[in-house]
Amino acid sequence: MTVDALRLVGIHKSFDGFKALTDAHFAARWGEVHALLGENGAGKSSLMNIAAGLYVPEQGELLVDDNAVRLAGPRNAAALHIGMVHQHFKLVRPFTVAENILLGHPLAQAERSHRRRMAQLEEQISARAAELGFAIDPRARVERLSIAEQQRVEILKVLLAGARILILDEPTAVLTDQEAERLLATVHALSRQGAAVALVTHKMADVKTWADRVTVMRGGRTVATVDPKATPTDELVRLTVGQSIAASEAVAEPALRGAPLLSLRGLRLQSSGRAALDGVDLTLHAGQIYGLAGVGGNGQTELADALMGMAEGLEGTVALADDDALEAGRRLPHFAAIPADRYGLALAGGLSVVENFGIGQVQSGRYGPAWRLDRARMAAEAREAVQAFDVQGVRHLNQKAALLSGGNAQKLVLAREFGRAPRLVLAHSPSRGLDVRAGAEVHARLRAARDAGAAVLLISEDLDEVLALADRVGVMARGRIVAEFDQPADRQQVGQAMVAHD
């Protein structure tokens, strides 16, 4: 009989009266990659956080190697060789790679001499990284690493702490196609060496390519466990969302280009001693989605910051069609911004839903002077927007925005930013980490803004997203736009432009 490395049976869990999990099940075997698929808010991360000892279930049973266990915290899970790599990394940014790994490593207590501890650990990190094909400097500071490198550090951290049951929560959400493929190939190899891997993901392609089995969750319940290679994608989508949404993602004909609305000329910006922006020239037109593709770290974030008025030391010209050039540090008028870091830049998690919605209009005076806001009007408009944009999980408007799932947090951002009929829209990785349905809704909102006459700049490292939405495609590399394509663009040519200048 096959022994399950990790099994959760009949799990129930509530938060503030909300039932996040109801009779949920999951089992991963030794030597397999078992994907956990579901919409945002389906309960996937909550279930895996129980397996990692972060949450205690109200009902149900957790078994490791077919033996029932009770976890009082992550240390208990680590002692049972369970390690979880979270979607939002748990690294201390000013620390080095080795210092971060030391925090959860047995050497932290076993060796008294700090110098010997660090020397031994750095050797272990280098050796394990070489085995996995990771290029990691143990002495590098985390704050100077790319997102992909930080993720490798998280994986090294749990593996060097002894994890043989590896839980990965949305590991490819912040990676490029190439980075994601390398990571999942490594994870697959670990499973073939005997590890058990639980892969929490929204990406059907990852499930079909790398998973041995897939468990689908919906509404806090386990729906089914199937063989992904023997199950059609349409059936997996149906299990995930309860209905087919393929029609909503049909690629429309490119829109007719309207008048120029925004002109960027010669944008230059230094960051950490390098040219993050190196002469960016771009014109955005009314009624058009301009999709900017590229490998991460080639100036996309700095360009988004420049448009949001957050780039200090910016040189060049940012001009609207009917205005003079804007001064650096000013945010564009009639501008909707959907930043890549929705929790860090778009929402204040400690503030309420209604406060996060209304804050965008405080300066305009829509709700009266800042010292005497019309909170009743703000609440009424927030309630209407929450309903119009189908923001799920809002039990009352005064609940903290941090309690919303990723997809619903993104919908709240959309409700606030699109509530003003913007003329310009910046969408930076708008569907990152979202499930199929939530991603489709975000895409529909961007198309609706375009159809209403707005100029939309879509910045995304997901080439499929760019090709599906954009009316014109640009490629950014080394701080410049190095190529442009009219739709329908050839995927291979776009990809070649991305890597040829990387």
Image: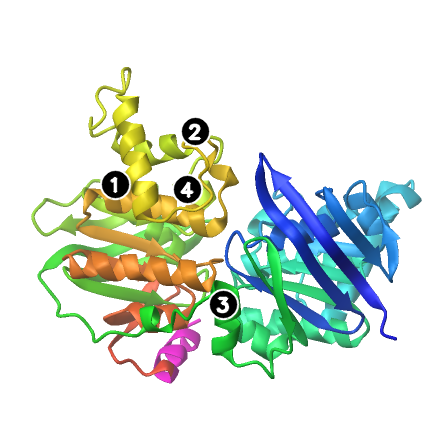
Is residue 89 a member of the stretch shown in magenta?
no
Three-letter amino acid code at disc 1?
Answer: Arg
Q: Which label's residue is closer to the chain start, 1 or 4?
A: 1
Secondary structure of the residue carrying tag 2 is: loop
* Magenta stretch: dominant secondary structure: helix
Q: Quadrant of the C terminus?
A: bottom left
Can you give x and y, in whole percent of width and height, for residue 101 in the image?
75, 50
For the record, the magenta segment spans 492-502
Given residues 132 and 401, the one toward you in this image is 401
Mark 1 and mark 2 lie on one chain; the one further toward the N terminus is 1
- Quadrant in which residue 355 is drawn: top left
Which residue, given by chain and number where applicable, does mark 4 sit on? 345
Q: Is residue 340 left or right of residue 264?
A: right
Q: Which residue is mark 1?
A: 331
The label number, if any, that marks residue 176 in the structure image: 3
- Which secondary structure, mark 1? loop
